[in-house]
Amino acid sequence: MIFAISYLGRVLYEDLYIFNFDIALEYIDWNVVFLIMGMMIVVAVIERTGIFQWLAFMAYRISGGRAWLLLPILMLVTGVASSLLDNVTTMLLMTPITVQIAIAMGINPLALLMPELMASNVVGISTLIGTPTNILIGSYAKISFNAFLTNLTPGVLLSLIALIIYSELVYRRELQAASEVSPMLLEKLADRARITEPKHLMKAGCVALGMLVLFVTSEHIHLHPAVTALMGATALLVWIRPDIEEMIEAVDWTTLVFFITLFIVVGAIREVGVISFIAGSIGHFVGDSLLLAMLSITWVSAILSTVVANIPFTAAMLPVVGFLTATFTGADSNVLFFCLAVGAAMGGNGSLIGASANMVTAGIAYRAGYPISYKYFFKKGFPALQLTVAMSMIWLLVHFPGGAAG
């Protein structure tokens, strides 16, 4: 549509021209596209080993069948997995076995799934590759893996603790109704959750460890995260030799095309001056107060992410936050980008359409006979959004005293 307006519309009215195809390509952040593609291949190899299902079952074994203990363990496992992989894939793999464990214990699977999902959206913020929104922010603002880790992890841990307490209270009745799993059913769960390819898992673990080292040291050796992801994907393809056609199918080309077109749309918005107008309006509202800018970006991002999917919202906000970062004294620490990361990702917990992982989990739960309605998600998720964003906001204000002083 953008190109139709630019090429055909200008015949009728010259000012309808936005940009040509060559300029549109300049707006595409190929670093993001190749980082996501590389991680998709890595995840496709790892998921075939059965490690996620095994981890979920081990969480049950460690808890001893006590639902109140199983809940935080599953939340922690899901959160850590989401910080190293993307939260969509994590929930795609964790949801089926979680549903089976919950049914075997005689409790509503949503009592485990909802906290898991919310933990996935929260803890994934702690790393560059944990959420699609972080990937966008990191590439645009040139923020390293270590910067996300050191500046956001303490606040994320505070939010996770608060989320665990909240989940224990909200789902206490369901958790108290848990019953002991019969030995026969436990044996079936163990069989479904076994590691299917231990040798491949060992190789994938070595490659994943190497990738983690490169992600952490990339700032010092000037290695872009996209290169690390592609190197890891290539190493797995050469070492494990999976079926290439299966790997090609494992790459979600629809998602990659979505990101490419998203960059073009945001570029068109910038070309027509909408971004400058929004940035100017926010700048006028917050004045010269960095504190007010931090609060505004965090909470506006969180609230709007319940209405608009957080990925396109983040992409549209990046130039705005970039403009404000260049405007405010003390914002050169990228604090406003970290505020955007917290608001956009944690805001995904506010509604069913807030994050892609929400829709994936809801789809699997629906097929299992436990639908998650928009009303139910909002009722459980929105208070969690307020609680977790508040905890992370407190950390940001303490960690960046320039904002608190402003």
Image: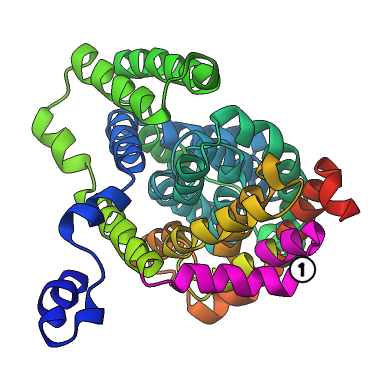
- Looking at the rendered image, the quarter that the N terminus falls into is bottom left
How far across and how far down the image is residue 119, in percent? 61, 50
The structure residue drawn at horizontal position 12% and vertical position 27%, both measured from the top left corner, is: 243
Location of residue 368 by image quarter: bottom left
How far across and how far down the image is residue 364, in percent? 36, 60
Q: Which residues are magenta?
A: 272-297
The structure residue drawn at horizontal position 42% and vertical position 40%, both measured from the top left corner, is: 189
**Position of 112 relative to 316 (above/below):** above
What secondary structure characterizes most of the magenta part? helix
For the image shown, how many numbered marks are present on the structure? 1
Pick the front one: 340 or 356: 340
Kind of residue at badge 1: Gly
Look at mark 1 in the image and give the residue it sits on: 287
Question: Is residue 115 at least partly visible in the picture?
Answer: no
Identify the residue at the far right of this view: 405
**Position of 379 relative to 204 (above/below):** below
**Position of 163 relative to 354 (above/below):** above
Magenta stretch encompasses residue 220? no
How far across and how far down the image is residue 185, in percent? 44, 44
Identify the residue at the far front of this view: 14
Pick the front one: 240 or 347: 347
Which secondary structure, mark 1?
A: loop
The structure residue drawn at horizontal position 54% and vertical position 38%, both measured from the top left corner, is: 83
